[in-house]
Amino acid sequence: MNADKTKNRLEYERRLQADMLDSFDEELEMEIDDDRMDELMADVTTSGEGTDLDRRFYFKELFRLQGELVKLQDWVVHKKLKVVVLFEGRDAAGKGGVIKRITQRLNPRVCRVAALPAPSERERSQWYFQRYVSYLPAGGEIVLFDRSWYNRAGVEKVMEFCSEDEYEEFFRTVPEFEKMLIRSGIILIKYWFSITDDEQHVRFTMRIRDPLKQWKLSPMDMESRRLWEQYTKAKETMLERTHIAEAPWWIIEAVDKKKARLNCIHHFLSQVPYAEIDHESVTLPDRVHNPDYLRQPVPTSMFVPTAY
């Protein structure tokens, strides 16, 4: 009997460890995807800047920071905080990779991503900020904007999707809009991911060569590459006119993706003072066994074929 108990306990511990490793594998899968891109990069350029972060250190820090993000999430829920984070930058600057690492271990009901499509005809006739307002958080929520109302200062300006009057009105309005959000109790954090001309060229070339990444390239992306200088001018104007004391811009050096992820998450954690919330210990209840219950057989035709 004792041998059976020991065997069951060891099997239970093995399954717990396997489940933990499977959780870590989520990050490993994304890193393997990055490794594929690094191999493609080697075919494209010999001068690209690789990461000088030790892989073990990177994973150790990432998992530690993600643990802190969970504590931050608990604090946001406990204190009913409202947090908005804007992620802006050129195409292929690495915004999506950072957002994935932030949300990876968090509750999607607490931390959600807002990535708005191009406005509809109806939305184009509304107050410019109106469609963004509905995505703002309630108490106990974090919203990460993968691009934001700053589209007007970037792509809309460069691609001439807005008039000069609309562009100037945006700059008159956005400081007041953001101050209003902050007065309402929203914590607003704005990040710009900065990469070099050469680095964007390399990342675009990698996407062209990688069939799993080609979907990320659109005609608009191609045009943004051609109009690099116009986007630079638009970015400089945007930072100059919207870097306000109440809602400053924070620049992330993003040529090295791994460093950018760690630096961004580390900084984000520093912007929202939080403390660890004490939770009551959780104990699984005893399973109810009903002697009259008989599990009904499931037809084999309903099972997904075992291909692996």
Image (tube, rainbow, N blue to C red):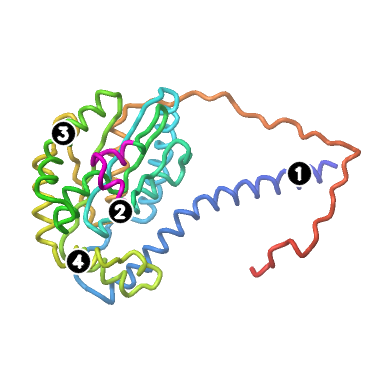
Q: Earlier in the sequence, mark 1 or mark 2?
A: 1
Q: Earlier in the sequence, mark 3 or mark 4?
A: 3
Q: Which residue is mark 1?
A: 6
Instruction: Tell me the CA gap for discs 3 and 4.
Output: 29 Å
Instruction: Tell me the CA gap for discs 4 and 2.
Output: 16 Å
Q: Residue 90 appears at what percent x and percent y?
A: 21, 56
Q: Does the magenta portion include 271?
A: no
Instruction: Tell me the CA gap for discs 4 and 1.
Output: 64 Å
Q: Secondary structure at mark 1?
A: helix
Q: Earlier in the sequence, mark 3 or mark 2?
A: 2
Which residue is depicted at the point 42% across and 44% down?
A: 103
Instruction: Tell me the CA gap for discs 1 and 2.
Output: 59 Å
Q: Residue 290 appears at what percent x and percent y?
A: 86, 36
In the picture, the disc for residue 223 is: 4
Residue closer to the observer: 104 or 266: 104
Tell me the amino acid under the disc marked 1. Answer: Thr
Q: Which residue is mark 2?
A: 118
Q: Which residue is mark 3?
A: 175
Q: Quadrant of the C terminus?
A: bottom right
Q: Secondary structure at mark 3?
A: helix
* Residue 13: quadrant of the picture: top right
Q: Secondary structure at mark 4?
A: helix
- Determine whether label 4 and label 2 are within 8 Å by CB: no
Tell me the amino acid under the disc marked 3. Answer: Pro
Q: Nearer the viewer, mark 3 or mark 2?
A: 2
- Determine whether label 1 and label 2 are within 8 Å by CB: no
Residue closer to the observer: 207 or 12: 207
